[in-house]
């Protein structure tokens, strides 16, 4: 094309495309939902802009916020079109090729190790999945602020953008044309497309229409020659014969005078039910529907079910509906960049209109692993995002969401037969079997978030502490809770004992445990680096104080201590003087040891040895 401007794909993007185009991955279905999801995002954007400026919607067909799918079976071209916000020339260049998203290389890496493409949408590179099924793709787009352009690429490292002078004007929005590869012939089939939309795009909140063929039977007059013949014979009949003829005619009339032929017509067929799931009564939504809804929200199309969900309707001063999900797995980088960059995974709607999925005021950081949405009736619609962010009712929404989220997690533990103290020997029901071990799974994936919550969220500290799990000197490889620990405490024990270190194996050998073990006291092992910080915030639980057994202050009832203190007075005094005060703070007779003769203990408000180590490694 004469007016085409050529561009090279950014290197990472090019690599991604290479891998996709050569992929032997069998589930290529994902491309369609990625395109529909992009169309839906673009429609959300224009609808949002229209809240403050109705003009942007234009008129006529442009106001129809819908997605259309069309198939040209002969040419093997599949097109997906939306009347969304569209892309300017600059948008096309940046979004589809030259600016790599942060997830690009992470996704390439993941694909090379797991070969699984299912999560492509989560990495922000879903568009490129078109090259699983097409070898040539055109993106025609019209944005309100620019002319209509065509982006095209054969995935050969380059793409071209031209001003569109040959296609029909789109009005506004984007049409993606996929020239299907020979191996992807199965997608040139309406039935297949319908099935995919039903399966993966059921919860898109805009109508998805398929230009569907319909075989209609049409009546056309039966062969004309025959009927003329008949007429001729009837004319030539005599009166006597007429009665006989009439009878014959009556018989003839029963035979069709016309015949049916099959004809193909096309019409738009609506493929999805646009009623939002969160507006329905929770009692009437099935588990399967929630699971599918989760998959569409999370852009996760693996078979995994979410661990739990909570769907509720808040009433009162601030009214909203919400659905929260605990994903089956933690995001790939949850405790690395994710925790610091991604505040919330909740989509905010105001009266059914999508506002934003980057609304940080809805949930605290430590709950950013939750997926879901909030639809508020109280928030105003026609104000800017910034003004919304300051709105008073957001605080109430946040408070209620946290409460519901923590309830959901607590229930996960309560319903898990593995978690209860009195393990039943009776045969377990199916339901129980399914719930067995679910909290351990949760803890494995998201336990650290609960700890971060204890640090961040003073209001809910106690609720969060209830959710903690850890190993102890008596947990026998399993994990235990604070409540369980307390239920096993000896009557003479006042504090909750714990010790911190790099691993359980290492801690088990610690001299600090000698005496406690001998006296049969249970000690908690905290072996995650974050635990050190955690214990600076978690001072007590259910009126019991936490005592680090490697720190000053450990009091074990021992009748001999007083006596020993007296007889070794001289030695301790000499020792303290010898070590001088900048080496040790004090030298004391201890009741915490059994076999080891002496041990270095941290002062009550000082850093534990392990914390020293952590801090030291951080400053290096
Ligand atoms: P993501 O949707 O996660 O941002 P994609 O690779 O699916 O990643 O899409 C890349 C970008 O291309 C989108 O963020 C959007 O800006 C743009 N885009 C893709 N499809 C459309 C469309 N139908 N309408 C408008 N913009 C689109
Ligand atoms: Mg996308």
Image: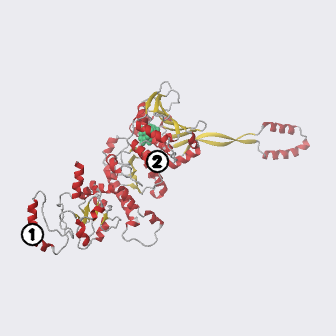
Q: Position of residue 299 (x, y in %)?
A: 44, 48
In the displayed structure, 422 sits above or below 349; it is below
Quadrant for residue 446, please give it.
bottom left
Q: Which residue is mark 2?
A: 115
Secondary element at image label 1: helix
Q: Label 1, on which residue?
A: 569
- Where residue 166 appears, as percent x and y from the top left, is 53, 27
Q: Residue at x 57, y 46 (%)?
A: 192
Residue that lies at the very extreme toward the bottom in this rendered image: 559
Q: Residues within 10 Å of mark 1 (few under 14, many from 20)?
A: few
- Horizontal arrangement in the rendering, residue 296 relative to residue 534 (left or right): right
Q: Secondary structure at mark 2?
A: loop
Tag on residue 148? none
Q: Residue at x 39, y 51 (%)?
A: 371
Query: Label 2, label 1: how many angstroms apart (C-alpha)?
Result: 69 Å
Residue 235 shown left or right of residue 436 in the figure: right
- Few, some or many residues within 10 Å of mark 2 (<14, 14–19, 20+): few
Tell me: 344 left or right of 128: left
User: Hey, which quadrant is residue 433 in on the image?
Assistant: bottom left
Query: Where is residue 356 drawn, in percent x and y?
Result: 38, 44
Does the rendering let one see residue 42?
no
Q: Is residue 259 visible?
A: yes
Nearer the N terminus, badge 2 or badge 1? Answer: 2
């Amino acid at each position: 094309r004469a007016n085409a401007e050529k561009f090279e794909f950014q290197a990472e993007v090019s690599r991604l495309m290479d891998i996709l185009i050569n992929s032997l991955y069998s589930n290529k279905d994902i491309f369609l939902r990625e395109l529909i999801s992009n169309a839906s995002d673009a429609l959300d954007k224009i609808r949002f802009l229209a809240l403050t400026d109705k003009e942007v919607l234009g008129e006529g067909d442009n106001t129809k916020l819908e997605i259309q799918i069309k198939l040209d079976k002969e040419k093997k071209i599949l097109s997906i079109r939306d009347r969304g916000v569209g892309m300017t020339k600059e948008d096309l260049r940046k979004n589809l090729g030259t600016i790599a998203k942060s997830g690009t290389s992470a996704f390439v890496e993941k694909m090379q190790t797991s070969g699984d493409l299912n999560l492509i949408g989560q990495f922000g590179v879903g568009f490129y999945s078109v090259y699983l099924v097409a070898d040539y793709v055109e993106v025609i787009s019209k944005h309100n602020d620019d002319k209509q352009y065509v982006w095209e690429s054969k995935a050969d490292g380059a793409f071209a953008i031209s001003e569109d002078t040959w296609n029909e004007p789109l009005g506004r929005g984007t049409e993606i044309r996929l020239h299907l590869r020979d191996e992807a012939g199965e997608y040139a089939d309406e039935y297949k497309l319908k099935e995919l939309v039903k399966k993966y795009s059921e919860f898109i909140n805009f109508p998805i229409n398929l230009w569907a063929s319909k075989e209609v039977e049409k009546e056309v007059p039966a062969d004309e020659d025959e009927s003329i013949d008949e007429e001729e014979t009837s004319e030539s009949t005599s009166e006597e014969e007429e009665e006989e003829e009439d009878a014959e005619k009556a018989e003839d009339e029963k035979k069709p005078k016309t015949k049916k032929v099959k004809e193909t017509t096309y019409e738009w067929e609506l493929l999805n039910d646009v009623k939002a799931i969160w507006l329905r009564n929770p009692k009437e939504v099935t588990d399967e529907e929630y699971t599918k809804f989760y998959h569409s929200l999370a852009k996760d199309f693996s078979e995994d079910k979410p661990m739990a969900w909570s769907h509720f309707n808040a009433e009162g001063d601030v009214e909203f509906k919400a659905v929260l999900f605990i994903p089956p797995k933690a995001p790939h980088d949850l405790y690395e960049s994710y925790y610091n960059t991604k505040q919330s995974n909740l989509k905010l709607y105001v009266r059914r209109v999508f506002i934003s999925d980057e609304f940080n005021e809805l949930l605290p950081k430590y709950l950013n692993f939750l997926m879901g949405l909030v639809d508020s009736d109280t928030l105003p619609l026609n104000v800017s995002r910034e003004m919304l962010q300051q709105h008073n009712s957001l605080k109430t929404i946040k408070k209620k969401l946290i409460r519901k989220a923590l309830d959901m997690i607590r229930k996960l533990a309560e319903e898990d037969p593995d978690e209860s103290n009195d393990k039943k020997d009776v045969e377990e029901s199916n339901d129980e079997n399914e719930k067995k071990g679910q909290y351990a799974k949760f803890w494995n994936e998201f336990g650290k978030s609960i700890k971060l919550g204890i640090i961040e969220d003073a209001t809910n500290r106690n609720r969060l502490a209830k959710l903690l799990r850890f190993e102890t000197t008596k947990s026998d490889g399993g994990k235990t809770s604070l409540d369980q620990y307390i239920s096993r405490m000896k009557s003479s024990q006042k504090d909750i004992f714990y010790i911190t270190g790099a691993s359980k194996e290492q801690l088990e050998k610690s001299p600090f445990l000698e005496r406690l073990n001998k006296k049969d006291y249970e000690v908690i092992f905290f072996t995650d680096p974050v635990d050190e910080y955690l214990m600076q915030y978690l001072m007590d639980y259910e009126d019991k104080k936490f005592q680090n057994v490697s720190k000053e202050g450990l009091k074990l009832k021992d009748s001999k201590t007083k006596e020993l203190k007296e007889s070794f007075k001289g030695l301790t005094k000499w020792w303290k003087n010898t070590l001088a005060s900048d080496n040790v703070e004090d030298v004391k007779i201890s009741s915490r040891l059994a076999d080891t003769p002496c041990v270095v203990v941290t002062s009550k408000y000082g850093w534990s040895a392990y914390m020293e180590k952590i801090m030291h490694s951080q400053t290096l």
